[in-house]
Amino acid sequence: MKSKTMKGSRAARPGNSVLGKGAATAFLSPSLIFIGIFLLIPAFWTLYLGLTDYKLVGIEALNPSFVGIDNFTKALNDPQFLSSLKLTIIYVLGSAIFGQALLGFILAWVLNELSPRIRNIVELIVIFAWIVPGSVVAFLWFAFFNNEEGTLNAILGVNIDWLLDYPMLSIIIFNIWRGTAFSMLLFSAAIASIPKSHIEVARVAGASKMQQLRNIVLPSARSYILTNLLLITLWTFNDFGPYLLTGGGPGGETQILPIFIYDSALRYLDFGYGSAIAAIMLFLNLVISLIVLRMSRKGKK
Amino acid sequence: MRNTLSVRTSSRTFKAVLGASLAGALLVSVVPSASAATGSVGGTCVKVGAKAKVGKIKVECKSVSGKKIWTDTKVYNVSISANAILGGKNNQTATWIQNYVIPQFELSNAEKGKQVNVSFTPAGIDDNQFKTQLALDLASKRGPDVMALDGFWVAEFAEAGYIKPLESVVGAKAVNAWEGWKQIPASVQGVMSYGGKNYGVPQGTDGRIIYFNKKLFADAGLPTNWQPKSWAELLTAANTIKTKTPSVMPLQLNAGDGMGEATAMQGFLNLLGGAGSLIYDGKTKKWTGNTKAVRDMLGFYDSVYNKDKVGNSDWQLLAGENGRNESFKAFAEGKLAMIIEGDYLWRGVINPVSGNFKMADRNTNVGFAMIPAQTAKSGVNGQSFMSMSGGSGYALNPNSANKSTAWELLQFINAKEPVSSFMAIGGAVRISQRQDVNTAVLKSDPCLKFVFEKAIPNTFFRPASVNYNAVSVLLQKATTSIVQGKSVAETAAAYETALKDLVGAANVASN
């Protein structure tokens, strides 16, 4: 029975699929079930909660009522939500796009020129920042930024309370330090995958380093760059790490969206509103993914 | 970092070793010392060590032939939780529960032939986080059998069905039969009641005063028996300190939403009251919106943090309770001259024995003053001085598997002897729920005597309304805005808009 279907489907789409539709579905179904249980159902549950006034305490905990899109309209008119969204965009642009991606690429590019031994040592150090647990990293940075006994002030010989006076800059630097390793690894792989002969030819033809970069490396690494941008944008967009450093403060200056959701739902116990904002974030995640996927498809054509 | 990296342990240190049902004889140890189950049928329990010394009690049930220890072979497990941890937050409570309540309660039951196993889940986290955690536990029908609750959470938890009146958990007959009620004044019972019903038993109450460092006052040429009679006099003293001794931070007046309810109790509620207004008027059933009292209250914050700069703005803006801890540390180290706090500061924070910011010269160097109203007789009811009272207590989990044992535990922790022993820990006397204990112990402590005699007569409780907490958060955020430099008019207007959105425009008073 099975072999028949396989043969049938192979005949229908010659040279394209090894498995038949039935077998493919059978292989995929476990993961689809898991995605359904752990991703789709919670997502729709979040959307549903966002349409209610459910709170963790008070009368609404016992008898939540359906409020339609009230929470969503409230969010779009809530100056705190809008400032949160703005802060999130600054955080993503600063720490992911200009920070991690750019620094990661520069590191990968420079390391490529160095001897393998030095490259390994530097890579190890950079990856270390990535594998240490977030709470430990936060503690290290808290000590680094501290205004009384902090390392940074000791180095610069100043007395600045970085987390209070430059909170956004602090969490951007924190996140660049933390996440650059991923971009560096991905770009190292991209650069390594470019045939040596291409660069060799360009060099012999008299291309400068910048020309090699522009005309050989960047076009070849295009799909890697887009994948990297997609992943780090989503990660940073959803990043809760800064909470460990600033708690969203001072006075909401680092209250990026994940922290805003946490505060709404788990601090002020308004699950309906928190869920509505989470649903908006989910939607923004989809939009980001679609834009990047479209860019990479265009690139392939 | 305290709030984010706090450790939450759930170890069960005290565990009775049981073998009664099979061996018929055993040896019970309720302290962490080694124990073994041996011997023949029967036995008796004895206390080893002085009863008064907490932590030194050891219970041993030795086998004596001919008598069964356990008349009941069932083991009753009950759990108790509080935001308290040994060596950290609310050290006194944690010490008391672990070293007194658990062994003594298990012992008293063992003597009756009942095997009770009490477990304590300590925590040392921000109160807001503790509340969330507890609410999540209760929402999923779990959680501790007996739980510490802040009095102002009762309305919200009751409305959510997480806690129920004691009489519906264990029956009116059992509740009324308890002798303890007649020792607890009605106003104090109110700390743990909602809609006229008792949801738990309060652990006492507290009051707010201004603490000042006498040495720093003397350095600045101020009297050491200081008592301001208006906000202006308070500001004058702060400015004098600022001018005479610039290295000293003059005043801590809690502000900002990071500190949560501390900003209400030690901050704006006293000021609002001093300006003649409560946050909620029980007669007109309206919340106080953009009124003159609110603007005056915000104006005082503006003076402290912006105009006169006699407070540390940074502390108010730090995440979580870090800022409040900074103020505690500064006061304990003699770098802060005045701090408005509850008696918790005296007995829990700067306590030279058991505090988490020990102040060696507390007993000689700390003076007390009542919080003045804006001007003489400008406060609510024509009062010249203000205080706010709160308090916490213990409630029962309606989903407890061992309700009657839990109720026994709740009675036990509110009985005379356990309450007295709680007071004895670290010399940290407090205003207890029981009058028979208060009369005996309060006179020995100068601060508690001051609070009991001067602050409590002028005190107010927060409204037992399900909306109170959300309104409080709005005012906390308003004080954040002021500290950040926004104008009073702008902040008060934004507060009223948010308040109307929350409780409905018809329920807001403004002028």
Image (cartoon, helix red, strand yellow):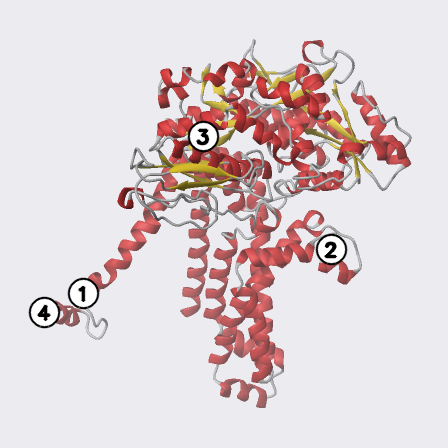
Circle 1 sits on which residue? A23
Give the chain of mark 1: A
Tag 3 subunit: A
The tag earlier along the polypeptide, 1 or 2, is: 1
Name the kind of residue labelled 2 in the image: Glu
Tag 2 near tag 4, CB within 8 Å: no
Up/down of B85 relative to A19, above or below: above
Labels 3, 4: front one: 3
Where residue B371 sits in the image (x, y, percent)?
Answer: 74, 22
| Distance in Å between CA atoms under marks 1 and 2 | 63 Å
* Residue B413 can be seen, yes or no: yes
- Tell me if mark 2 has few (under 14), some (14-19) or many (20+) residues whose alpha carbon lies within 10 angstroms of its own: few
- Residue at the spot 30% in from the left edge and 34% down from the top edge: B72
- Given residues A179 and A7, the one toward you in this image is A179
Q: Which residue is mark 4?
A: A4
User: How far is disc 3 from disc 2 in space, using C-alphas?
Assistant: 41 Å
Question: Mark 4 — on which chain does it sit?
Answer: A
- The answer to whether marks 3 and 4 sit on the same chain is yes
Percent position (x, y) of residue B414? 50, 25
User: Which element type, helix, strand or loop, lies under badge 3?
Assistant: loop
Three-letter code for the amino acid on which mark 3 is drawn: Val
Q: On the image, which quarter does residue A63 sit in?
A: top left
Q: Are marks 3 and 2 in contact (CB under 8 Å)?
A: no
Query: The numbered mark 2 sits on a residue in which chain?
Result: A
Q: Which mark is residue A149?
A: 2
- In front of the other: B182 or B212: B182
Say what amino acid the circle numbered 4 marks. Answer: Lys
